[in-house]
Amino acid sequence: MEFSIATLLSHFSGDKLVAPKLLEKKLSCQDEESLNKLQIVLDALEKVGLLVKERGKYRRVYEEDVVEAKLRCSSKGFCFAIQDAEQAEDIYIRESHLSNAWNGDRVLVKVTKEGSRRRSPEGEVRLILERANPSVLARVKQTNTGYQAVPLDDRLLFEINLRANGENLENSVDNLVHVAVLRYPLGEHPPVGKVARILGSDAEAAADTDIVCCKHDLRRFFPENVLKAADALPTSLRPTDLKKRLDLRSFLTLTIDTAAATETDQTPIVENALTLEKTEAGHWRLGIHITDVAHYVLPNSLVDEEAKKRGTAVYLGDTVLPLLPDAVSDRCSLVPGQERLAISVLLTLDDAGQVVEFEIQPTVIQVDRQLSYEEAQSLLLGDGEDNPEMAPVVEMLNQLFSVLSPAVKAHRLARGAFELNLLETNLPYKDESRLGAIVVSSPPVRPLLTELMLLANQAVASHIQALSSPGVYCVQPSPDPEELQDLLKLANNLGLSLQMQEESEVHPSDFKNFTEMFAGSSAARVLNYLLKSTLKPAGYSTTPGPHFGLALGAGDPELEKPYTHCISPLQRYTDLLVQRVIHTVFEKGRDRRSIRSKDPVNLYHSSSHGNINWNVLPPDVTEEMQTQLSSVISHLNECEKLAADAEADLEGLKKAELMKERTGEVFQGLITGVQSYGFFVEIEDLLVEGLVHVSSLKDDWYEFRARHACLVGRKNRTAYRLGDRVEVQVKSVDYYRQQIDLVTVGGGSEASNEDIEGDE
């Protein structure tokens, strides 16, 4: 089993002693080679003073001036160590103090010089915890001593000696290749690698998905032993599988989905189903049924370990890199006519869309109808009126999306939440997804379904918290107020009077006000797109926290509600973990203080909230679960970031390819950023950004006015400021770096006297 030092150290907390046997189990070290490697690492960490050995067990040693961080390097040779903690200072590291660490590596840094008001603290890399570049994209060159790979990423400050591996390296010279790193730098010895694949003569000749997968080292294929383990999973339900499960097979059950498929285009992934009924009290009982993947994918199994490594599915256009093999989706996807095991969130809502109560149950369900979003939308518009068989389906759709979902949405908006008008169509998840906010998407039934799915996520999070169980929560910090300033200036220059409630803090209601004002602007699409870019990524934590995009936990006691992800266990590992938490609570939880107590609580129902004054789970189970969740959270956040970066990278390459084909064409654009070296223009129709470099402005000498965010011509009094509309021509495109150079053809505005006088 391969493991990093970071993974090994994640199993240490505080001053606790950890036995080697426990580490062997946690790291799945079973064969003799893995056990020997583990012992070598433990001995090395003890030698460098990071671990101490006491009575055959190990304890982590913490030093005040040593911090964990991630390296961010520049092409000029210097780096900064970025700490995970909010507000923590970045640490400057000279090239000579990198100790062979590369850009993106997770490292331990010893602070050697404290920072001041104007200077960052300085440090040196003491230990590399985890390598971020197991492979690189590079061009091959031939030297007097052999062949070398020169990385395309100029932040990687090294060249790799290539080892012949059955390939004729001469054929790869001057080509773009994917290089697997066989050995990282060791002292004075350079890194060694092998050509894994020749992608093409250059980046433009290579497939964009190949570039992205290789650049981000994405796992495109499942190991053979994982596929065999997945194939060995049971294909039919046994009577024992149905024990202690609520039978909901008689209810009219619908799925509404895009029928997302894996890279091989074989198995549709359908994770959620819906039921709806009226209760005797006149309330709605909404069932959101989530396929029970945890029943099949057991902890520490081969399938589980591979899913943990992947962390999340990655969506690259028509190519999907799944979390789990097709064999798992075959057994779990909710398809019509097939009995399926589920975790069901049964929500009771009043006519105003308020949740009155809820319960969470292991269930068995059977889907009656599978609809696409487009089919559901057509039925809502009356296309199924003449078909008696579809009458119950149409009635249920109308109750869900004409009555219930709009009421739920009204409550979300009332607490200050917002939605971005981006008209997205490629949204793989039914909740707020990686973006962390609701977007107006097409067809309209899709965001209405999201409103209901959010309720399931909230209910599960509140239940885990109320039962004091370890859990995984989804949190999203507020945007940085400084990052909003350019957008506020831009909007104000367009005639929109945008102001925040507080200068020092951004509230969800600020975004709500902004989006409402954007709706009346001719640049609404660009403004929403820019507002989206100011959102901080959502992440996972073992403790509840605020979620900005959904306006949860915003200081108001009414809003202090935890949130998690649970509806996509076939696509996100966190959702699978949450299912395991639910199963553990139901299987091992105590519903009363002692066996002598006569009044148990219903651990499946929200009525238990506030009525528990004992530990629901045994202490050893709680500790074990908390340790497991804590050890994997950082990795899962890294996986989410990797997936988001890869998906954004592919989008950038496609935009660069589009603009390359349109070199020389003229477009209308909006100035969205101004710097001393030029200004950025968003081409409104395509949502593509390019740079007009100041050197291309030949008609005058332009000076930068930082206070007014504009460039001003000395003689012609022409200004280029935030919000100005300009005509630009595509001059050139660097496809791999996704840089688009533009030149102005017309536009701009007349400088005021204040602009001419400058910032003084």
Image (cartoon, helix red, strand yellow):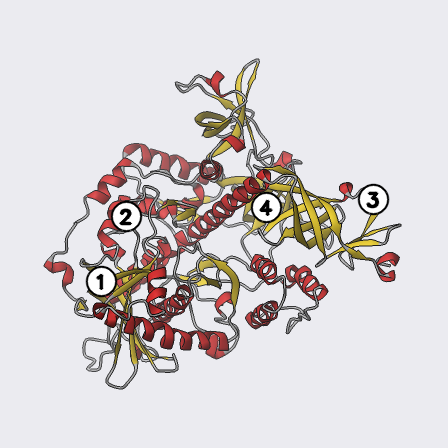
- Report, in whole angstroms, how far the alpha carbon at label 2 lies from the one at label 1: 17 Å
- Report, in whole angstroms, how far the alpha carbon at label 4 lies from the one at label 1: 51 Å
Amino acid residing under circle 2: Thr
Percent coordinates x, y for residue 358 in the rendering: 30, 75
- Report, in whole angstroms, how far the alpha carbon at label 4 lies from the one at label 2: 42 Å
Name the residue furthest top: 144
The residue to which callout 1 is attached is 367
Asked whether the beta carbons under mark 4 and mark 2 sit within 8 Å of each other, the answer is no
Amino acid residing under circle 4: Ala
Q: Quadrant of the N terminus?
A: top left
Q: From where the camera sits, is residue 23 visible?
A: no
**Circle 2 Cα neighbour tier, 10 Å, few/some/many (<14 / 14–19 / ≥20):** some
- Numbered badge on residue 699: 3
Percent coordinates x, y for residue 366 in the rendering: 19, 63
Percent coordinates x, y for residue 180 in the rendering: 45, 30
Q: Residue at x 60, y 63 (%)?
A: 524
The residue to which callout 4 is attached is 81
Percent coordinates x, y for residue 438 in the rendering: 47, 64
Amino acid residing under circle 3: Asp
- Numbered badge on residue 267: 2
407 displayed left or right of 396: right
Give the secondary structure at mark 1: loop
Of 593 and 191, nearer the camera is 191
Task: Judge whether 218 appears above or below 491 on screen.
Answer: above
